[in-house]
Image (cartoon, rainbow, N blue to C red):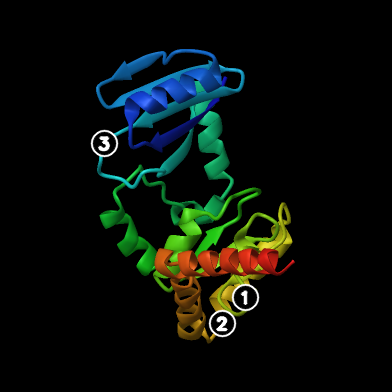
């Protein structure tokens, strides 16, 4: 039976072990000095945390763990369905940002068809590098992307909508303009700017309350 794998970079391994042990109601099934994992049955997940120091805290990677050659063959079949385009799909293992960012910088389009997300780092990173991102509406991408202005949006679970958005991204003659607007959008989120806006909003609320 296949199992989802989630790996998470943490800052304090011991504190994180205590937290997730309480959350899962179980101690790690395996641990080392800089690593711990839980092999959970409900939900069926291989959840691992590590404190290696070579990735930003909160970095996460996903995968599918298989337990037999038959399951591995099934996963391979998914790729085979790409037919003559199979060689266009490349799988990369987890890599440091120093290796990842050059790949993103040379991408024509970054496609992130997520069903649910929360201010996704992958989108933030791609837009900060001036890349055109295709994301899904209703999955927080629309908080960052203005369709056709600094990226493109498609509908969730809609293959035709996703294809249309990718085709629009690849066909646009405004690559530099959209990329520059994507980068500018992320600049607005810099801590010193976002923090100042938040403080200003609180100040306005306090001032309004004082006048009542």
Query: In this rendering, would 124 be left or right of 57?
Result: right
Q: Is residue 91 above or below residue 148?
A: above
Residue 151: image location, x then y, percent: 57, 73
Query: In this rendering, would 57 be left or right of 137?
Result: left
Seen at 40% across and 44% down, the residue is 59
Mark 1 or mark 3: whose residue is earlier in sequence: 3
* Picture quarter with the N terminus: top right
Seen at 63% across and 74% down, the residue is 146
* Picture quarter with the C terminus: bottom right
Q: Nearer the viewer, residue 22 or 196?
A: 196
Q: Is residue 44 above or below residue 153?
A: above
Q: Label 1, label 3: how many angstroms apart (C-alpha)? A: 40 Å
SS for tag 3?
A: loop
Residue 159: image location, x then y, percent: 70, 57
Q: Return the residue at label 3.
A: 52
Q: Return the residue at label 1.
A: 168
Find residue 172 and name its label.
2
């Amino acid at each position: 039976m296949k199992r989802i794998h989630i790996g998470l970079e943490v800052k304090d391994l011991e504190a994180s072990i205590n937290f997730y042990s309480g959350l899962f109601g179980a101690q790690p099934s395996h641990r080392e000095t800089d690593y711990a994992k839980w092999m959970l049955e409900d939900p069926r997940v291989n959840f691992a945390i590590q404190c290696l120091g070579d990735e930003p805290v909160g970095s996460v990677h996903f995968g599918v763990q298989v337990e037999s050659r038959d399951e591995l063959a099934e996963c391979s079949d998914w790729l085979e369905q790409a037919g003559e385009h199979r060689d266009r799909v490349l799988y990369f293992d987890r890599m440091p940002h120093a290796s990842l960012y050059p790949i993103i910088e040379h991408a024509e389009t970054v496609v992130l068809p997520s069903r649910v997300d929360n201010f996704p780092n992958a989108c933030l990173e791609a837009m900060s590098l001036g890349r055109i991102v295709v994301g899904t509406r209703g999955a927080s991408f629309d908080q960052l992307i203005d369709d056709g202005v600094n990226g493109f949006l498609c509908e969730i679970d809609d293959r035709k909508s996703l294809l249309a958005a990718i085709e629009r991204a690849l066909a646009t003659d405004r690559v530099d303009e959209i990329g520059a607007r994507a980068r500018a959008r992320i600049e607005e989120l810099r801590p010193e700017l976002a923090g100042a806006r938040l403080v200003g909003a609180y100040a306005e609320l306090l001032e309004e309350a004082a006048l009542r």
